[in-house]
Amino acid sequence: MGSHGIRDRVAIVGMGCTPFGEHWNRSADDLLVDAVGEAVTSAGITLDDIDAFWLGTQASGVSGLTLSRPLHLPCKPVTRLENMCATGSEALRNACYAVASGAYDVAMAVGVEKLKDSGMSGLSGTTMPGAGDDSRGEITAPANFSLLAPAYAAKYGLGEAELKDVITRIAWKNHANGARNPRAQFRKEVPLERIKSAPIVAGMLGVFDCSGVSDGSAAAIVVRAEDAYRYTDKPIFVKALSLVAGPADGLQDPEYDFTTFPEVVASAQEAYRQAGVTDPRAEIALAEVHDCFTPTELVLMEDLGFSGRGQAWKDVTSGVFDLDGSLPVNPDGGLKAFGHPIGASGLRMMFEAWLQLRGEAPPERTVRTLAEGRSLALTHNLGGGPGECVSFVSLVGSELTD
Amino acid sequence: MAGLIAYGAYVPYHRLARADLAAVLGTPPGKGTRAVAGYDEDTTSMAVEAARGALAPDGLRPRIGQLFLATAAPAYLDKTNATAVHAALGLDEHVLAADMAGSVRSGLGALITAARSTVPTLTVLSDLRTGLPGGSDESAGGDGAAAFVFGGHRDSTPVIAELLAHDTVSDEILDRWRLPGSPTSRVWEERFAEEIYVDLAGEALTAALDRAGLDIAAVDHLIVSGLHARACASVRRKTGARPEAVTADLTAAIGNPGTAQPGLLLADVLDRARPGETIALVVLGDGAGVILLRTTDALPAHRSARPVAGQIAAGSAPMPYATYLSWRGLLDREPPRRPDPEPPYAPPAHRRNRWKYGFVAARCEKCGTRHLPPDRVCTSCRSVDAMTGEPMADVRGTVATFTVDRLAHTPSPPMLVVVVDYDGGGRFRCQLTDATEADAVIGARVEMTFRRTVTAAGVHNYFWKARPVRTDED
C-alpha cells in the first residue's frame, strides 16, 4: 500500500482554452469544440490520434456523450466525471494516470461549464446533495466562504477593517493580472477603493471579493514523457497530482477553527512529496490557486505552505504574491478575473502554467521568477467549502529531473 | 386529584405598531402593538415552542398520553399538524396526536377535552390571525400559542391548579365565519350577537359555579376570551364578579390571538396567581364555555419558566408594516435571482424524523463525540453503528463563526447563518432567527427554536434554528 506519484512519467503536449466570459451565443458544445480544436492544433495532431478522453463537467451534461456527440467521436472511450470545483483538475488527473498506466498512448482531458444560460446569480445546481430531509440549511457559496473572515480576524487579532484591506488587495491583484490576459472575463484593473466599497454580498465579502459567473472550456493532451518531444519542443512534465476528499466534519467538529482547509494542507504535502519539493515558496515559479472568494486565497497561502500561520495577510500586503513578487499567485487573473465555470477552471489554471513555463505568456504578465531559474508551477482547486471540501494540487515543470 | 400540572406560553418576538399601520394606510391612528409570528413561524412551530415550555419539568414528557393541537390556521389540511408537534417534542409513538382545527372554538374544545381526560393530556392552542390590510382583524389580531398539561391523578407530579368544574353551552350562531382558503373572516353587525353571548356566558358560568358549590364572588380571576370584543367587554361588566377579579385581556400589547387567546390569558394569570385562588376562564364563540380552576400550594414552585409578561416585554422594536405584509404574503416582493428552494423529500424526511423534527443528535458510545446531524460512523474514532440518540433541542451553544448571506432565498433577507458549538460538545451550522445582524457575532450565546424554514412546492419545511439567548437564565 502506498501512494506512488507519476513524477516525470507523463507530459502535456498540447493545450487549448477558450476565452472565459458571458458566451450568450455559444453553447457548451461550441466551447468544447473550440477548446479541443485548439489543443489538437497545438500538439500538431488530429482527434483521431487521441485514444481516450476524460471530460469534466459538473452541471453541463452527463455521460461521455456530452463530449462525443458535439465532436462526433468515432466510438472512443469517453469518461465524464465530476468532483465539485476540482472537476477540471480531476479530468486531467485521470487522463494522466491512464497514460502512465500504459493503457493509452494519447489521452485528452477536457473541462467545460455553461453557467450563464441559467439566468441565476452565482452558481446554480452546485450544492452538495444533502440528506434530502432539507435540514442542512444550504447557504450560498459566498456566504459559505465568508465564514473564514471573522474566524481569521479573531484568531490573528486583525480588525475587521484591516482584514477587509487585505482581501481587497487580493482582488485588486488578480484583476490587475487579468487585465493583461485576453482570455479573461474581466479585463480591467479595478481601483482598491472601488473593490472595498462595492455592495456587500455575504459577510465581509463585496461583489469584487467573489469570482464571476462565466462560461468556458479548456483541454489538455497527455502523452508518455518519453514521447513528448515528438509532439512539441516544449512539453510540460507532470511532477505531482494529489487529490483528497476530506472527512467533511468541520461543520460538526468544534476543533475546526475556520482559518484553514485541512484538505488543502494534506493534498499540498502529498504533492510536494511526489515532486520532491521541500520549500515551495522558494522553489515554485508561479501558483494558480482557487481564489473563488478573496478570503479563500488568503487562507490558501498558509495551507499551501507559502506563508507561515497567521502571516499570509502580511505577505499579501507586502506584495509577495503580486505579478512581480517573489511568488506570483494567479498571474492569469485567477477565478477573480476568469469567473469559475466549474469543469473548466482546473484546466484553465493548467493552461496558464503551460503558457508561462513555455515562455508563451505575453511579456506584460510573464513572471520574473522563471528568469531566475525556477521551472515549477502549481495549480490548486478546491470544491466544497470550509470544513468540508475536496482539494487538488498539481505540480508541473518544464524540465525533467535528472 | 385531577387538574393542571404544567403550562407554557409562546409569544412571538416580533411586534407591529398599530400607529405605523395607520400611517401607511391612512386609517385612524391605533394604539399599542400586536404580536407577529416570524416569517419562519406558523401555528405548528409556535405550538412546539409553547409545548416545550409546558414540558420543561423533568419526567413529564414520558407521562403524556395524548396531544391535541387546536388552531384556526392549520399549516396543513388533510395532513395532521399535531404529528409534527409530536415529532418535535419526541413523544412516544403510541401517544395520540390529533388536530382540533378550523374554528377558534377548538381552543376551548381542546382545553375541556384535556381537563376531562383520564390520561395526562397535552393540549396546545395556537393561532395566527391575519386580516386584509386596514381591517380590524389585522390590527386587533395577534399570534401566539399556549400549552397545558392536565393530569396528575397519579405519582409525584403535583397539581398546580385543581379543576373545580366546567360547563359549555353550544349555540349555532352566524357572528363570524371564514370560507376555507380565505385570509380573513367576515363578521355580522356586532351588536347582533352581543346580548346572546352575555346570556350564554351567564348560563355557563352559573352552571359551573353551581357544580363547584361557589358563588361568583369567590372568583379571584375572571378571564373572558373571544373574538367578539364587544361581547367580551359586556360579559366582563355583567357577570357580577368582583371588579378587582376581572382581568384585562392582552390585546393592547399583543393583539387577540384567537384560538390561543384563552390559553395565553390563562397562562398569564397562572404566572402571577397566588395559591388557593379561583380562576374562571370564560370563552365566547359559537356558544360559551367555562373552566373553573383553583390554584394550589404547588403553583409558585411550578410556574412556567417564561412568563407571558416577560415575553411581551422582550418583544422586538416594531417592525416596518411593509415587512409584515411581505411575511404574510400580502406584498409580493421580487425574489432573488437564485434557483427556487427545493422542498424536503418525503422518504428521507421520514427516515430522519428524530433529527429533523426532534433535533436528536448522536453520541458515540466509544469516544463520546457528539454528531449533529447523527452519523453512523464516528467522526473522531470512526466506530460504526455505536451511537446513542442525544436530544439537543434544549442545549445551548456559542457562535464559533457567522455570516450574513444576502443572496440566499429567504422570505426575510438577509439570511443570518451561524456555526454553533454546543455546550457539552458538538457543532452545527444553522440559521439565526429573531435576530439582527448585530446579534451574529463570535461568542454570542444561542438557543434552539423550532421553525418553518421555507415553504417550497406546497411543502412546509420544518427544522431548527438558533436564536439569541435573551433570558437571564444563561
Image: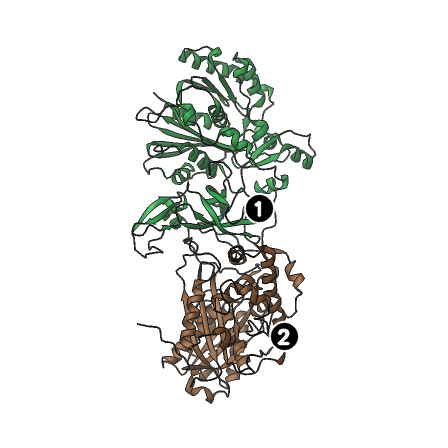
Chain colours: A brown, B green
**Quarter holding the N terminus of chain B?**
top left
Residue beneath label 1, please? B438
Callout 1: chain: B
Q: Callout 2: few (<14), some (14-19), or many (20+) C-alpha neighbours within 10 Å?
A: many
- Residue A167 horizontal/vertical position (percent): 58, 62
Q: Secondary structure at mark 2?
A: loop
- Residue B12 horizontal/vertical position (percent): 52, 36
Residue type at numbered disc 2: Arg
Residue type at numbered disc 1: Ala
Do dots 1 and 2 share one subunit?
no
Q: Is A261 or B283 nearer to us in this picture?
A: A261
Disc 1 vs disc 2: which is toward the camera? 1
Question: Is B425 left, or right, of B386 in this rendering?
Answer: right
Residue A295 at least partly seen: yes
- The answer to whether A316 is drawn above or below residue B350 in the figure is below
**Which label sits on residue A193?**
none
- The answer to whether A343 is drawn above or below residue B148 in the figure is below
The quadrant holding residue A191 is bottom right
Question: Is A364 left, or right, of B44 in this rendering?
Answer: right
Callout 2: chain: A
- The answer to whether A271 is drawn above or below residue B187 in the figure is below
Q: Is B434 or A147 nearer to us in this picture?
A: A147
Q: CA distance from mark 1 to mark 2?
A: 41 Å
- Residue A264 horizontal/vertical position (percent): 45, 66
Residue B101 at least partly seen: no
Number of callouts: 2
Q: Secondary structure at mark 1?
A: helix
Residue beneath label 2, please? A180
- Residue A210 horizontal/vertical position (percent): 57, 62
